[in-house]
């Protein structure tokens, strides 16, 4: 929460730590835990706020290969421009994830959701332990067994038909 209204024009800096309290509060979670230092630079102009969010730290996510918890290091920046409209309103309109328009009666901005989304966007589609040896080997064995059983039971009649077709050719 940044109460920008009462602040002087010019540059301001804030620093926040997003830890497990933050991730648990967000609830929607692919991420349950982590420690990210978030530094926010704000440049305030008469009708414009320019933000740079610098994220640096580690979050805990599930490894796609063994389902164990793994550390994912993050180090990235996000920009956000907030335009202050000259109309009496407390509405916050998000043009896209980099531009917001707010009425002049908005006195503070809550970035919780923005920050959370930004972190989620940085999680690669595939995330596995960098080294296969760090994976939970017990779990890998079990997953392999399940997969084999599935393959054996999957005799789709269409595949059988295709096979006979192949032999005919
Ligand atoms: Zn793993």
Image: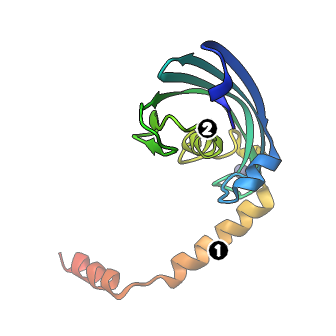
Mark 1 or mark 2: which is in front?
2
Q: 86 or 119, which lies in front?
A: 86
Percent of width and height locating residue 27:
70, 59
Queried on whether the Cβ of the residue with tag 2 lies below 8 angstroms from ligand 1, the answer reads no
Q: Residue at x 57, y 45 (%)?
A: 117
Which secondary structure, mark 1? helix
Q: Which mark is residue 146?
A: 1
Q: Which residue is most to the left?
A: 169
Quadrant of the rendered structure where residue 54 is?
top right
Mark 1: is the Cβ under 8 angstroms from ligand 1? no
| Image coords of residue 72 (percent x, y) | 70, 39
Assess whether mark 2 and mark 1 are in contact (beta carbons under 8 angstroms). no
Q: Is residue 105 above or below residue 149?
A: above
**Can residue 6 be seen in the rendering of this structure?**
yes
| Residue toward you, 102 or 71 | 102
Determine the residue positioned at 33% across, 80% down.
159
Label 2 neighbour load within 10 Å: few <14, some 14-19, many 20+: some
Residue 160: give its label: none
Label annotation for residue 109: 2
Q: CA–CA distance between discs 1 and 2?
A: 49 Å
Q: Earlier in the sequence, mark 1 or mark 2?
A: 2
Left of 150 or right of it: where is 26? right
- Picture coordinates of residue 41, whole percent (x, y): 64, 20
């Amino acid at each position: 929460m940044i109460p920008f209204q009462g602040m002087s024009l010019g540059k301001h800096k804030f620093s926040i730590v997003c830890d497990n309290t933050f991730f648990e509060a967000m609830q929607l979670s692919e991420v349950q835990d982590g420690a990210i230092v978030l530094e926010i630079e704000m440049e305030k102009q008469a009708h414009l706020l320019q933000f740079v969010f610098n994220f640096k730290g580690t979050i805990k996510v599930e490894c796609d290969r063994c389902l164990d918890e793994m550390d994912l290091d993050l180090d990235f920046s996000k920009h956000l421009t907030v335009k202050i409209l000259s109309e009496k309103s407390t509405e916050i309109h998000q043009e896209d994830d980099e531009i917001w328009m707010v009425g002049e009666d908005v006195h503070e901005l809550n970035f919780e959701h923005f920050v959370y989304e930004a972190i989620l966007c940085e999680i690669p589609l595939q995330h596995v332990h960098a080294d296969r040896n760090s994976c939970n080997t017990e779990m890998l064995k079990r997953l392999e067994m399940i997969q084999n059983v599935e393959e054996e039971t999957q005799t789709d009649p269409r595949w059988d038909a295709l096979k006979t077709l192949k032999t005919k050719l």
